[in-house]
Image (tube, rainbow, N blue to C red):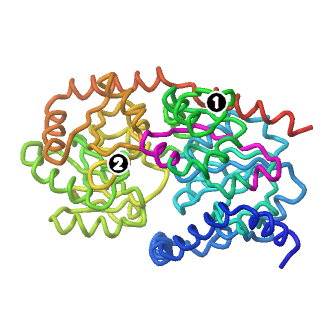
Amino acid sequence: MPAAWRRTFRAWGRSGLAVIYDGLLFAALLLVAPCYFWKLYRRGHWREGFGQRFGGYSPEVRRRLAGRNTVWFHAVSVGEINQCARLIDRLGTGLASWTVVVSTTTSTGMAELRRQLSRENVVPVYYPLDLVLIVERALRTIRPRLVVLLEAEIWPNFLWRMARRNVPALLINARMSERSAARYRFFGWFFRARFSQLAGVGVQNESDARLLASLGCRPERIRVTGNLKFDTVAPLDGSRIDPCPILRWAGGRDRSVYLLGSSTHAGEERLLGEIYLRLRREFPELFLVIVPRHFERSAEVERELKSLGLATRRRSGFESRPAGTGQCLVVDSTGELRSFYEAVDVVVVGKSFCSHGGQNPVEAAAIGCPVLTGPNMENFRAVMNILLQRRAIVQVGGPVELETAVSSLLADEEGRAALGRRARQTIIENQGAVERSAELIEAHLPALSD
């Protein structure tokens, strides 16, 4: 066993809590391993970077990190990658002398990371599993001098090892629900020390600040910076496509009215397909666009829609197949959702009907789309509260209410336009979190670059 591993193991062994945590996490990983590996396999490209999840890096990654001052940003998936890209853009020359490691946990996040942050000084990696020896193995290669975690990434071993190395860790765009806080409070004897180690915390609102302080974050290190989601609304340079030719190729026409299901999850595609078929009797020019949250589900989604009798085309066939007369387009690509928002008339947010948590409604609202969601928007509670207060979004209780709401909007062009205008104005009025979050990060950079 390498000497560094022996030292880590001894330090880890002196903490009974760490031993218990690692044991429980390892047991949990064994239990979920079949599902985890099956999900990786289904999403494709699972071999690429697989060893990084265990702290192993290729010679090329090691070469790019050797002897560099490194800042490590962690962004879980696509939404956080968008936020991270904005922060790195804003920090600009302040990071010019740094190597920026950006980690993610999903293959879709990695694809978006490489698309948005393909730069010489940015090294994309997968986040390591939070077992102490794996974390230590990753840190010996990356050797960060500052760590920036986005939203709610509290991994005990990772933060413990940062503290042991005297590396400041910042939590940016932090959010905390009463339910999550209750769970952390129940294990406060374990998590309180981890929260207290955070060198700076940028929270979305005063409620988040209060809850995080109650969990152990030092009040003097907490700053209300706002919600980064309000700032991550415009396509980055070069990322926009023109969706109109694709929609016409799939069967849309100049007079078509487009209903888009955004970042849908299993069950929601069928729900929207059934609603579409009923509404088309009243609105014959209606055309359905489905953008699954995970593009690798596209074949499954297409089969589901075809089983309803829908003539369906997939976006990937645009350049290779002749134009058709379909009723539905399945967008099996990444990074194009915001472009499609610009061409549609009504947006239904996924993961809010047949699953929980919801998906980001801000991008569609910022473009001025009339947006509807289901009841399950727990991950965007603060955003939803603001939008609902301004009557800038429509939230319904279930499938029946959804069909009624979509029908009402389709029949009322001026009502759609007014809803979209309120949505766009609300987003504009709540922007500025990127600037405030960047200032928090900058406050920790000068001392590190000496």
User: The disc labelled 2 sits on which kind of residue?
Assistant: Ser
In the picture provided, is 321 more to the left or to the right than 162? left
Look at 57% across and 47% down and name the residue there: 188
Return the mark for residue 262. Answer: 2
Q: Quadrant of residue 24?
A: bottom right
Residue 91 placement (x, y as % from top left): 72, 34
Pointer 2 and pointer 1: residues touching (CB < 8 Å)? no
**Disc 1: which residue:** 222
- Picture residue at 42% right of the left edge, 61% below the top: 295
Looking at this rendering, what residue extends furthest in the left direction? Answer: 281
Q: How far apart are marks 2 and 1 (CA)?
A: 34 Å
Q: Give the range drawn in magenta.
A: 161-185
Q: Which of marks 2 and 1 is in front?
A: 1
Amino acid, disc 1: Ile
- Return the x and y of residue 67 as percentages of the image width and height: 90, 56
* Mark 1 surroundings within 10 Å by alpha-carbon count, few (fewer than 14), some (14 through 19), many (20 or more): many
Q: For the N terminus, which image quadrant? A: bottom right
Which corner quadrant holds the C terminus?
Answer: top right
Q: Position of residue 333 (x, y in %)?
A: 45, 58
User: Would you say 14 lies left or right of 298 here?
Assistant: right
Q: What residue lies at 41% left-to-right and 33% top-to-bottom?
A: 383
